[in-house]
């Protein structure tokens, strides 16, 4: 771990974005965060308006970082409005103060970076072959031989987090460290808390993409995730996990699987106090929909 961090530390050059009125607070950007594990990519560190070096902050790691703060620069002109929502929650004293570490995706690598590898390995060879056939038929941008999620998590845990812990006045323990994302970002957030329970004490998984790709008849992928979760979901005594889903567009394909999420949470000893699996009727698979409700997982993660 130390060697990876040393490699990064010598090659990191951050700068502060000029605030053009498109976001609240301050964003410090590393344009190409160096990595021994994955293709370097942009990492933004969002700091609230009240940020001061004299106090300590919780940390929220988020995926798809280019979609979080500024709709004028996103591919679909939508954003999560993380800065506005987080600022409002802090100003209203509803949450403990936190900073956000926003890791950008590389579009052509996103599915390989975020698809949890160990659940994929639970599939039979016959199913893996059929999945590859389905992927090729639909022209889906995915190569199963290049699944890189274990290295993506190493990037966060062994390279990004040590930099954040050294550079900013943050709590470094799992109790004060959370991870959050939507769709494939929901899957990798679930995977992160299971693989690194000593690093992440909390996770929020919005519109978790249980179908893996596009849904099809007898899709074995959801059950592979549930088998993995059943075995690896961490101790509910010191971990919290949030799931949610809409009912329209891509989210509609998750509806028939959500009872399994509820079953596993209950079986593993989770209760309403440390877990959620919320349904949002009429909401779809988009930043606009996630934006409407991110105050709920943010409060769940950092509520006073």
Image (cartoon, grey):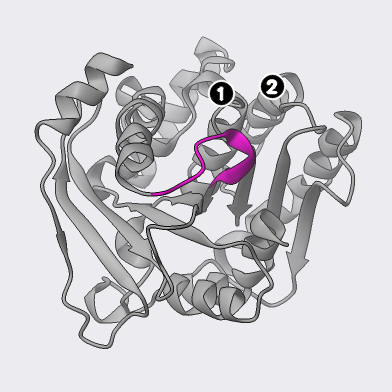
Residue placed most toward the observer, 262 or 299: 299
Q: Which residue matches tag 1?
A: 195
Q: Which residues are magenta?
A: 169-178
> Dividing the picture into quarters, in which one does residue 211 lie?
top right
Secondary element at image label 1: helix
Residues marked 1 and 2 touching at CB (< 8 Å): yes
Quarter of the picture containing the N terminus is top left
Residue placed furthest toward the front? 54
Residue 270 is a magenta residue: no
Residue placed most toward the observer, 183 or 136: 183
Residue 79: image x %, image y %? 40, 74
Of labels 1 and 2, earlier in sequence is 1
> Dividing the picture into quarters, in which one does residue 143 lie?
top left
132 sits left or right of 106 in the view: right
Tag of residue 232: 2
Residue placed furthest toward the bottom? 21
> Which residue appears at 43% of the width and 74% of the height?
50
Residue 172 is a magenta residue: yes
Quarter of the picture containing the C terminus is bottom right
């Amino acid at each position: 771990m130390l060697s990876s961090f040393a490699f990064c530390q010598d090659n990191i050059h951050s700068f502060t974005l000029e605030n053009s009125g498109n976001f609240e607070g301050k964003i410090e950007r590393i344009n190409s965060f160096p990595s021994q594990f994955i293709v370097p990519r942009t990492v933004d560190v969002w700091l609230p308006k009240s940020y001061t070096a004299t106090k300590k902050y919780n940390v929220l790691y988020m995926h798809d970082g280019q979609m979080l703060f500024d709709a004028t620069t996103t591919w679909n002109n939508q954003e999560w409005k993380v800065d506005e929502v987080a600022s409002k929650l802090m100003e209203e004293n509803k949450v403990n103060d936190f900073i956000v570490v926003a890791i950008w995706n590389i579009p052509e690598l996103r599915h390989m970076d975020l698809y949890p590898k160990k659940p994929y390995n639970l599939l039979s060879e016959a199913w893996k072959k059929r999945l590859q056939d389905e992927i090729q038929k639909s022209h889906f941008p995915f190569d199963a031989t290049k699944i890189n999620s274990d290295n993506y998590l190493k990037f966060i845990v062994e390279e990004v987090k040590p930099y954040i812990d050294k550079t900013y006045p943050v709590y470094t323990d799992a109790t004060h460290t959370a991870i959050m994302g939507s769709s494939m970002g929901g899957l990798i957030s679930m995977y992160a808390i299971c693989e690194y329970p000593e690093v992440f004490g909390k996770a929020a998984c919005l519109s978790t993409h249980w179908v893996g790709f596009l849904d099809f008849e007898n899709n074995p992928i959801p059950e592979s995730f549930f088998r993995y979760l059943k075995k690896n979901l961490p101790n509910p005594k010191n971990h919290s996990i949030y799931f949610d889903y809409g009912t329209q567009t891509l989210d509609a394909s998750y509806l028939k699987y959500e009872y399994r999420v509820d079953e596993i949470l209950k079986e593993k000893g989770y209760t309403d106090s440390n877990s959620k699996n919320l349904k949002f009727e009429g909401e779809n698979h988009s930043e606009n929909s996630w934006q409407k409700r991110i105050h709920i997982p943010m409060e769940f993660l950092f509520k006073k």
